[in-house]
Structure formats: C-alpha cells, structure tokens
C-alpha cells in the first residue's frame, strides 16, 4: 500500500516511526525544492542515501550490491551519505515523500551507524511548535513509560535533558507538570515527548472506560446489534 | 404515547473524512445537516460545504428506542460542539481519510479529546481503503499512536457502502457489549 504525503503535515519523526515500527524495507523518496533523494531502507533502518535526478531511474537498480559497485561505493562509506543527504536536511519542512516497499534486493547486512531510533530523536529536535502540538495537544495529557524498551533507549542516544524528561514520566505527572519541573523552554519538553511517543518509549495513560455511566442493558444492546445487522 | 429513549453514538473525525456520508448511508431518515458554504480557500479546494454544528441521522431500534448518530464538525474551531454532542454518548467512531495523512494527526487529537472527557469505547474507521493511494490499516494505527493497551481497533470503512458502515457500528457495539459483560 502507498505511503505518501507532505513533510509539512507528516514530518520525519512520523515517517521514521512508521518505517521503524514495522521494520519495513524499500526506498523512501523525498522531493525537496532543490533536490530529490532516495533513502534505502532495510529492515527499518536507513542504510544509504543518494540524490537522484529522476525517480524512475532508481527502479532500474534492483540489486543493492550491484548498485553500490556501480556507484563505486563500499559498505563503510554508506553512513556518510546519511549524514550528508538526510541528517543535514532534517530541519527542512517542505517536501513530498513517498515510500516504495519491497522492490530492492539486499544481499547482506550493512553497517547501521545511525539507527532509526537515533534518527527519530535527531528529527524531533527540529520540530516546530505547530508540529509538536499535533501530538502534545493538551497540557493535561498523562503519559506512562512502556516497560522493556532498554534496547530502544540505548539506540536513541538521548541527551541529558531528554533523559531527565523521560525520568519524569510516571503516569501521574501531566505534561504541564513535567514542563514546570524541567524549567526550560516547553518546546524542548514537547519535542522530547513527541520523540518518546514515536519510539514507543511512552504511551498515553489509559483512562478507565466508563461504560456503566450510560444506562444500557445487555438486552437492549442485543436488540441494537440485531437491528443494525438487519438494515 | 410512549416516550422514545435515545441512544447516542458520535461520528467524529477530521475535515472531509466522510462523516456526513457515513451517517447518510445508514440513517433511516434523510440526514439533517447543518452545512455552510466554505470560504477558506484551503478547505474549499477539498469540498464546497462543511458541517458547522452537527449532522444527525437515526435508526429505529424498537417502539421505545432510537439510535441517534451525531456527526461532529471536523474543524477544531467547532470543538465546542464536540463537548455538547459527546455528553451521554455510548461510543465514538472516528473516521480518517486513508489517503490523506494530514488528517491522521487531527484524528489523534480528536481521540485525545474524547478520551479525556468522555472515556467511552472508540473505533477508528479508515475510510477510502478501496482507493489505490490508501495507507494500510497498520500504518494508520502507528501514525495515530494507537497503543495496544488503548483497545481502539482500526477497521476499514467505505462510507458509501452500507455493509461497511454497518460493520463499523457493529464493531463499536460489540466492544460496548464486551465492556458491559467484562
């Protein structure tokens, strides 16, 4: 299925979240104003980036190893391309992206110097107030830590402030309280929370569903279900 | 004359997600709409009219009960209506346009809104799944940050197809039933 959109409404954190969570493989294309880039994704990791003149030309190189030899590149030089054509562009907000799953054949393992978890954190540091507001929309939101995420945390390479913010999330403190305790620009806190959500390190604390407040009987429910079926 | 008891379900979702059509497809009465012409150019490029207060459709259950389907306006500038319409609702169906990722974040904000004020069962209906540029259900679930703990199913919906709309309503009512018995 397609995975296309506009960076203004679906930023790099969001894109990396989807690629990483599902451990996708394929090619991510981003059409910037000045450049079109192809990002090669293997099992949820971006392993290579290169500028391209025409998208369709990428489809002629289906074998990744052959492509590397054609470009006279070795596996060790791949991380440099990520720095040059991806990390340096994480602050750019105008572009159209599309992800083409599958398609490319990867023959072996390639070095991953910038794990997707780290890219999520790096991208989050460029989010604007408007972007963070999409997920951190309410200062009364409550988040809790997701257990068993040590590996993700290790790969994410949080800085000291981000680690501190993470340590304050306990399922009891609201976003507002965390912002007050950190005592820094609230955008820093919101960016970190946005990244933690994308990394799956935290989740919204579930409120108890209060179905019983609404008077409805099982008998009536059965009737409703039957009625809908018969429509 | 017996007084008819009302059972309320909310059909929410971002602008142009298909809420009015959803209600239209299954309502036994002609949907009551409160649409106004759109003047904002960004929205007008999508459609000419938008719901400003609510859409209303209903399904007769028996002599004493009617199921009311309330469609909320999609834009956040009308969120005061969500508060009014959400009161007493049994559950919420949040529609998203599967082909338009700009609506996913808005959908999450709508889910947050209802979760914090009216913690009732929620189902996400991924509309327009039949279109070639539709995002997969799993990608939509991840984009919406729906954690398994939240128990919010993401199901395919075609708002123009009666069976599909019925299926969304049935999914919601089965969750309500499970909550009552659980």
Image: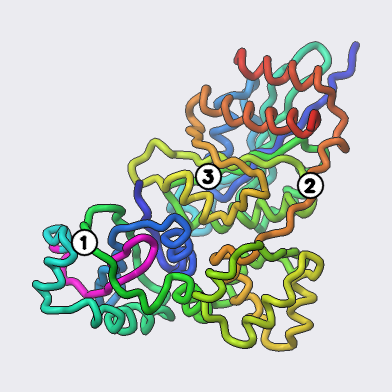
Residue sitting at 66 percent across and 79 percent down?
Answer: A189
Report if residue A212 lies within the magenta region.
Answer: no
- Please identify the quarter of the rendering in which residue A12 is found: bottom left
Q: Residue furthest left?
A: A70
Residue sitting at 58 percent across and 56 percent down?
Answer: B145
Give the residue pinned by disc 1. Answer: A107
Q: Chain of mark 2?
A: B
Residue sitting at 80 percent across and 28 percent down?
Answer: B181
In the rendered view, does A205 fall on the left or right side of B104? right
Which labelled disc corresponds to residue B118?
2
Q: Tell me the CA gap for discs 2 and 1.
A: 51 Å
Q: Tell me the CA gap for discs 3 and 2.
A: 21 Å
Looking at the picture, how far across and down is residue B98, in whole percent?
46, 46
Total numbered labels: 3
Rendered position, B128 above or below A217: below
Q: Nearer the viewer, residue A38 or B166?
A: A38
Q: Chain of mark 1?
A: A
Looking at the picture, how far across and down is residue B174, in whole percent?
68, 28
Q: Nearer the viewer, mark 2 or mark 1?
A: 1
**Quadrant location, the N terminus of chain B:** top right
Q: Nearer the viewer, residue A124 or B58?
A: A124
Looking at the picture, how far across and down is residue A158, in whole percent?
56, 81
Give the residue pinned by disc 3. Answer: B17
Q: Which residues are magenta?
A: A40-57
């Amino acid at each position: 299925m397609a995975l296309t959109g506009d960076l203004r409404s679906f930023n790099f954190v969001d894109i990396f979240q989807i690629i990483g969570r599902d451990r996708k493989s394929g090619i991510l294309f981003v059409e910037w104003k000045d450049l079109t880039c192809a990002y090669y994704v293997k099992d949820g990791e971006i392993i290579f980036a290169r500028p391209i003149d025409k998208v369709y030309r990428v489809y002629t190189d289906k074998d990744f190893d052959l492509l590397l030899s054609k470009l006279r590149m070795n596996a060790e030089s791949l991380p440099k391309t990520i720095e040059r054509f991806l990390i340096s562009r994480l602050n750019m907000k105008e572009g159209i992206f599309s992800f083409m799953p599958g398609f490319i054949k990867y023959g072996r393992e390639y070095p991953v110097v910038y794990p997707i978890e780290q890219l999520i954190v790096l991208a989050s540091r460029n989010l604007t107030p408007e972007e963070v507001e999409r997920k951190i929309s309410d200062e009364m939101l409550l988040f809790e830590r997701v257990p068993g995420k040590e590996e993700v945390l290790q790969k994410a390479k949080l800085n000291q402030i981000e680690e501190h913010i993470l340590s304050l999330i306990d399922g009891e403190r609201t976003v507002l309280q965390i912002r007050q305790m950190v005592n820094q620009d609230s955008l820093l806190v919101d960016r970190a929370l946005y990244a933690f959500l994308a990394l799956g390190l935290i989740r919204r604390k579930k409120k108890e569903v209060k179905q019983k407040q609404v008077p409805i009987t099982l008998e009536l429910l059965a009737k409703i279900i039957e009625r809908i079926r018969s429509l | 004359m017996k007084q008819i008891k009302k059972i309320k379900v909310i059909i929410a979702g971002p602008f142009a997600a298909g809420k009015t059509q959803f209600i239209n497809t299954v309502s036994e009465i002609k949907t009551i709409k409160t649409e106004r012409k759109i003047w904002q150019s960004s929205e007008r490029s999508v459609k000419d009219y938008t719901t400003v207060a609510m859409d209303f459709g209903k399904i007769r259950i028996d002599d004493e009960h009617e199921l009311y389907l309330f469609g909320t306006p999609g834009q956040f500038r009308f969120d005061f209506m969500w508060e009014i319409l959400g009161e007493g609702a049994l559950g919420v169906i949040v529609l998203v346009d599967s082909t338009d990722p700009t609506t996913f974040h808005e959908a999450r904000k709508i889910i947050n809104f209802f979760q914090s004020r009216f913690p009732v069962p929620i189902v996400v209906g991924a509309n327009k799944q039949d279109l070639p540029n539709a995002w997969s259900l799993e990608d939509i679930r991840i984009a919406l940050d729906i954690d398994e703990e939240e128990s919010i199913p993401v199901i395919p919906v075609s708002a123009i197809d009666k069976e599909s709309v019925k299926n969304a309503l049935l999914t919601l009512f089965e969750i309500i039933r499970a909550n009552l018995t659980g």
